[in-house]
Image (cartoon, rainbow, N blue to C red):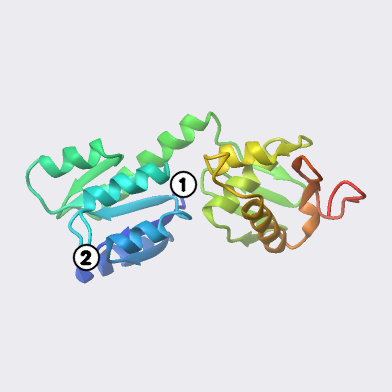
Amino acid sequence: MVIQVRILLVEPNSVMSQALLSCFQRHRYEVNSVDSGQAALAGHDDVDMVLLALELPDLDGVEVCREIRVRSNVPIIALTSGSGEVDRVLAIQEGADDCLVKPFSHRELLVRMRSIMRRMHASFGRVDEISHGSLNIDPYSRQVHVNGDSVSLTRKEFDLLYMLASRPGAVVSRKELMAQVWEDEWAVSDRTIDTHVSTLRSKLGNREWIVTIHGVGYRMGAAGEPVGLAGR
C-alpha cells in the first residue's frame, strides 16, 4: 500500500520541482511546493515530510534543516547537488533523516520516503486502523473517512483525532494533548487546541464526535450520542 503523506517540497530549480510534482501527483501524494528557505520555515508545520534542497537562494539549506528540527520532528530528506560527503554529513548531523545526491531516480526517492514512514509508524508501536462508529482512521495512510467519505485533515488535526480515538472513553487532558500532539506543553495556548477541535468537528460533520470535558480536556464521542452537560 502507498503511504499517503503531505509533502513540503523545497526546491528552487523549477525544472526539478515540476518533475517531482508530476511524480507525486501520479502517486496521489499531496504536495506543497516552495522555492526558498523562508517559505520552508513558514510551511513545515502541517506536513508529514519535508524534501529540502540544500542549495537555496536566501538561506543556507543546512541551517534551514537545523531550524526545522528544533521546531518539529517532521521527517526531512535533504536533496543536495554536492558530489562530496560534507553536505550530506552536515545535513544528517543537523537532523535530516536521509540525504539524496542529485540527480536521483524518482523510484529511489519514493522508496526512501516509504522506508522513513514505516520506521516512524513502527516507533509508535501500532499501525492499526481505528473504526469508531461511522468514523474510520487509518494511521498508516493518514486517511480519515466518515460514512465512507474522505475527510481532509492537516497533520495536527489528524494527530489530535487519532490520539482521542485511540483511547475510547478516556478523557485526554489539554496538557497531554499539548505534550503529545504539539510536543510542547507550555508554548501551546488553550486557544490553539480549541481552534483545532472546532475545525475537526466541522470537518467531521458533527460537533458531537469530540466531547468537551470542562476544566479537564476532551474525549471521543460519537455523532448522535447525547452530549448532555459534559460537552459542548
In the rendered view, would you say 59 is above or below 15? above
- The residue to which callout 1 is attached is 1
Q: Position of residue 189 (x, y in %)?
A: 61, 50
Visible residue check, residue 36: yes
| Point 39% across, 50% down: residue | 49
Which residue is nearer to you in this view: 59 or 90? 59
Q: Is residue 23 visible?
A: no
Quadrant in the rendering for residue 25 = bottom left
- Element assignment for label 1: loop
Image quarter where the C terminus lies is bottom right
Q: Earlier in the sequence, mark 2 or mark 1?
A: 1
| Label drawn at residue 219 | none
Q: Residues within 10 Å of mark 2 (few under 14, many from 20)?
A: few
Disc number lying in front (2 or 1): 2
- Describe the element under mark 2 as helix, strand or loop: helix
**Amino acid type shown at disc 2:** Met
Q: Nearer the viewer, residue 179 or 165?
A: 179
**Residue bearing mark 2:** 16
Q: Position of residue 172 (x, y in %)?
A: 71, 37
Res 166 quadrant in image: top right
Residue at image position (91%, 51%) is: 226
